[in-house]
Image (cartoon, grey):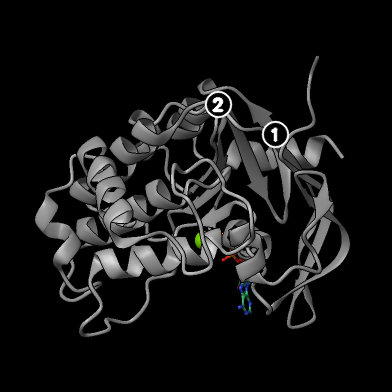
Amino acid sequence: MSKTPELVVRELHVSVEGKEILKGLNLEISKGQIHALMGPNGSGKSTFANTLMGHPRYEVTQGEILFKGQSVLEMEADERSRSGLFMAFQYPVAIPGVSVANFLRTALNARLSPSETNGSGAMPSKRGINPKEFRAMLKDKMALLKVDESFATRYLNDGFSGGEKKRAEILQMAVLKPEIAIMDETDSGLDIDALRVVSDGVNALAGPELGVLLITHYQRILNYIKPHFVHVMMDGRIVTSGGPELAHQLESRGYDWMRVKEVATP
Ligand code: ADP
Ligand code: MG
């Protein structure tokens, strides 16, 4: 009765500029699950996220990444996102004249461009979702996420605060309806506003149709988002996995006791 997880990562080895960063990483994520990936700076968390999304600089030298049973290693980044992998977008430069709504509609049309519908409630056609239908859908999503309607007409990234950038990101996730979302909270400097936006957003969108990989150095965000699984990464591999209690242990004890454990268990 157990079905194959949507995302399966096996023995993944990744090099950046000839240097091996990921050294045999294994992870499985199913829809409906929230996984937290924690680890000290430099352990390879962002390398993993970028590799999942197909960033060309990250070279997979060994291992496999399967999404819905198919290898993604030969897929370009845009193909991966069309197939239902989502990564909180590396924030684009401000483009004067492109509103949040325009940006989201363009992104959705790209996602819908393969022929079939994806359950977003939108009817794709060659020209994409029609504007009226899109506006109605966006309005629903904004209500769900408690985003003020005026946000949609603002120019993307134009003077956005940290919290507003996160709001745009979460809104994009709501509109695109990915099956697996990867959130790399790189900047440990998320202020409390941004942190709330991310955690309220993830909590509103989480459910049986979404799997989440939340990458974080700090335990703090896990006070707001309850993960089902917590993994600790050290030197390019996952050294321990457990439930939410693992995050609390890390908070009180730091990562150093893990290092000791890592040495003790070859
Ligand atoms: P984390 O996100 O866990 O802090 P990273 O994946 O950012 O870790 O970094 C892991 C290691 O890979 C570090 O030693 C870092 O210097 C190296 N690294 C990551 N990305 C690059 C890159 N684009 N060029 C060179 N080295 C990189
Ligand atoms: Mg990082």
Local crowd size for mark 1, using a 10 Å CA cut-off: few (<14), some (14–19), many (≥20): some
| Dot 2 and dot 1 residues touching (CB under 8 Å) | yes
Position of residue 191 relative to residue 219, above or below, is: below
Q: Residue 153, image x and y in percent? A: 15, 66
* Occupied quadrant, residue 257: top right
Is 236 positioned to the left or the right of 133 in the image?
right
Which quadrant holds the N terminus? top right
Q: Which residue is mark 2?
A: 246
Residue 43 appears in the picture as rendered: no
Q: Residue at the top extreme? A: 1
Local crowd size for mark 2, using a 10 Å CA cut-off: few (<14), some (14–19), many (≥20): some
Residue sitting at x 18%, y 48%: 193
Residue 95 appears in the picture as rendered: yes
Q: Residue 40, image x and y in percent? A: 55, 52
Q: Which residue is mark 1?
A: 240
Nearest to N terminus: mark 2 or mark 1: 1
Which quadrant holds the C terminus? top right
* Occupied quadrant, residue 103: bottom left
